[in-house]
């Protein structure tokens, strides 16, 4: 019986207090042991004196007092998985994908960020990760559609048709058709109009 199966039974079944206590004890026992998955490899997490390990399948476990227990990660607002580890009475949060990369992927060039190759932030297996520079990470986000540009960005001020209107009809320096006039029309600053007109923004609009 798995932990999830035991929890489902506990929630759904009509159990006596004695049966419920027995099942809760079983869940605690199952939670405190983690059997290795096929081909799973564990390595110590640096700076924790062998008290925590991470696997190539992105599972994290603690080894306190001879007991092995899996640590359930939290999903933060950005979609990444994060675990909280303890050292010297203090807590520190770590991204799971970074722990996996630090333990299993060489980084001879000293790149500072870890990229999810398939774009899935929950797929933190070592085969789906790579060290990248910030520029490489941003480029990959645009390529995979994880980061939107131009009119598709959630902060975009204009539609594609409005950008075309600005580039077609705006006349820099003209009192009636200049940047200030279009800024009043679209309720934005003249700089935003200027950047759209000269193609410094909305580069994807033809």
Image (tube, rainbow, N blue to C red):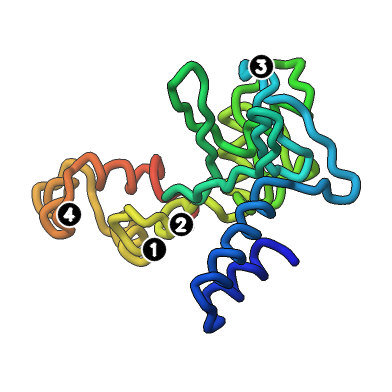
Spatial separation of the CA atoms under disc 2 and disc 4: 18 Å
Spatial separation of the CA atoms under disc 4 and disc 3: 62 Å
Judge the density around disc 1: few (<14), some (14-19), many (≥20) Cα neighbours within 10 Å.
some
Q: Is residue 175 above or below residue 63?
A: below
Q: Secondary structure at mark 2?
A: loop
What residue does disc 2 label? Answer: 205
What residue does disc 3 label? Answer: 49
Q: Quadrant of the N terminus?
A: bottom right
Measured as percent of width and height from the top left, residue 185 is found at 14, 59
Q: Residue at x 17, y 41 (%)?
A: 173
Q: Is residue 175 above or below residue 91?
A: below
What residue does disc 4 label? Answer: 182
- Mark identifier at residue 160: 1
Q: Secondary structure at mark 1?
A: helix
Measured as percent of width and height from the top left, residue 74 is found at 50, 48
Spatial separation of the CA atoms under disc 2 and disc 1: 6 Å
> Which residue is most to the bottom?
14
């Amino acid at each position: 019986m798995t932990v999830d199966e035991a929890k489902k039974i506990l929630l759904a079944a009509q159990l006596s207090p004695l049966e419920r206590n027995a099942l809760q004890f079983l869940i605690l026992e199952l939670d405190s042991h983690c059997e290795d998955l096929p081909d799973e490899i564990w390595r110590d997490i640096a700076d924790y004196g062998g008290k925590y390990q991470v696997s190539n399948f992105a599972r994290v476990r603690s080894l306190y007092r001879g007991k092995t227990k899996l640590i359930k990660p939290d999903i933060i607002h950005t979609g990444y998985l994060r675990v909280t580890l303890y050292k010297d009475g203090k807590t520190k949060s770590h991204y799971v994908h970074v722990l996996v990369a630090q333990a299993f992927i060489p980084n001879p060039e000293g790149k500072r960020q870890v990229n999810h190759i398939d774009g899935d932030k929950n797929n933190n297996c070592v085969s789906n990760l790579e060290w990248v520079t910030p520029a490489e990470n941003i480029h990959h986000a645009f390529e995979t559609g994880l980061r939107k540009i131009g009119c598709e960005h959630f902060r975009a001020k204009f539609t594609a048709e409005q950008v075309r209107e600005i580039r077609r009809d705006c006349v820099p320096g003209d009192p009636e058709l200049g940047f200030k006039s279009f800024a009043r029309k679209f309720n934005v600053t003249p700089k935003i109009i200027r950047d759209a007109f000269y193609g410094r923004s909305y580069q994807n609009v033809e």
